[in-house]
Image: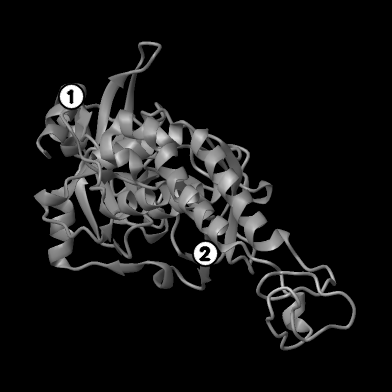
Amino acid sequence: MLGTLVALSALGLIAWALFWDRAWGRKRCRRCWYELSGAGPVVCPECGTPAANDRAMLRTRRKWRSAGAAVVLLATAYPISTVPRVRQSGWRGAIPTTALIVWVGRNEPPEVFGSGAVSRPTAEAAELARRAARSELWGWQWKLLIRELGLIRSRERWPRGVPWEVSVYVPNWLLAAPCVMQVGLPAELCRGEVGCDVGVNSALPVETRRLPPDARSVRLAVSAPGWKGHVEQPVQQVDTLDEAMAGVANLVIDASVRRALRCGFVHYEDHRGDKVWMLTGCVCRHRGPLADDIAIGLRVELMRDDTPVAAWALRPQDVGKQTDWCVIPPSVATWRAGDSSDMSRWTVRVRGDQSVALGDWRRERCWVGEFTVPLSELLLDQAALSRWVGACW
């Protein structure tokens, strides 16, 4: 507060020193500012300074010493305003917020999840989180923060006619401040079952309606501490899926995906105590090994006697992040796990699907191969699931 008062006072002094004493049609000596009435003399009777022309006698009087003093005063305003932050955070409290946003956005290491915990942020990120939570960011700084940290995520190239997808990921160190951010879709893209709010920190994108054919950006409403506004999310519409995301498949990549993919049917109790089956999955890239630039989007088909019974889209995420899942209806899960003759009739075909992988905004390639395994290999209980995921670390 004191720093703001000093800054405003300094700016007022600068305006007074440089722009207040205008001639307003009065002719004055350009040296001593003695008023010269009438058409002239050409020489000032007070100091003897000759006047070159009328324009020279109509100049604004600048008080350079006062302006210089005001500049010095202005330079002290920021250090004064940072005193509370420096007391709390040390020298990092003196870093300008804009510079801090750029530094954190380009140098903060990715969050790492492990053993039920998340990696700690750097001291610079923690300081930025405190300022955001205290509503110290201006609107344009929030837009810079969203862009530098990639808080709103969508694919730059998107195929025409395919429902657009967008996700929001706020780092845990920013949420813990706490920093509550909400993102809303424009009304024309809202779907009834989704609504108009994009969930924060879901690894899975929100599917919206199709974009207008001529759309080059999507206007998203953002609400953050101390600021409400809009962010334009750019999008370039293309004609085919391959233009948006290239599909890759060969014997080597197919084998790597099969080793890296952890996809299975888990038997568990729901909130009512009923036993149900759920299809879930994750990707353990180092077990493939699977290249980091290959996205995984799946179409999982349940087969009985080589005939499709049901199919589900699945977006398995890298281990440590939220995984995709879907509940298997009892009318579909009719296999008898203890009957070997019945289980021999059931298989699962796993195919890479470009349209499902599109939601992975970071990657430009996706797997489009396929493989088939017996259903018995994919049936898990909760204990097996824990061992299954734990083996990926």
Q: Residue furthest right?
A: 38
How far is disc 2 from disc 1 in space, using C-alphas?
51 Å
Front residue of this view, candidates 4 and 284: 4
Q: Is residue 61 left or right of residue 389?
A: right
Q: Nearer the viewer, mark 2 or mark 1?
A: 2
Say left or right for 65 vs 171: right
Q: Front-most of 137 and 300?
A: 137
Residue 119, quarter of the rendered image: top left
Q: Position of residue 287 (x, y in %)?
A: 10, 49
Q: Position of residue 302 (x, y in %)?
A: 32, 43
* SS class, disc 1: loop
Residue 338: numbered disc: 1
Assess disc 2: are there few (<14), some (14-19) or many (≥20) residues with their C-alpha within 10 Å of its C-alpha.
some
Foreground residue among 213 and 355: 213
Kindly identify the residue that appears in the image at 46 percent across and 52 percent down. 72
Q: Amino acid at mark 2?
A: Val
Residue at x-position 41% and y-position 28%: 178
Which residue was labeled with disc 2?
235
For residue 122, which numbered disc appears in the image?
none
Kind of residue indicated by mark 1:
Gly
Q: Position of residue 307 (x, y in %)?
A: 34, 48
Residue at 20 percent of width and 24 percent of height: 381
Q: Position of residue 350 (x, y in %)?
A: 27, 51
Residue shown at 82% from the left, 84% from the top: 41
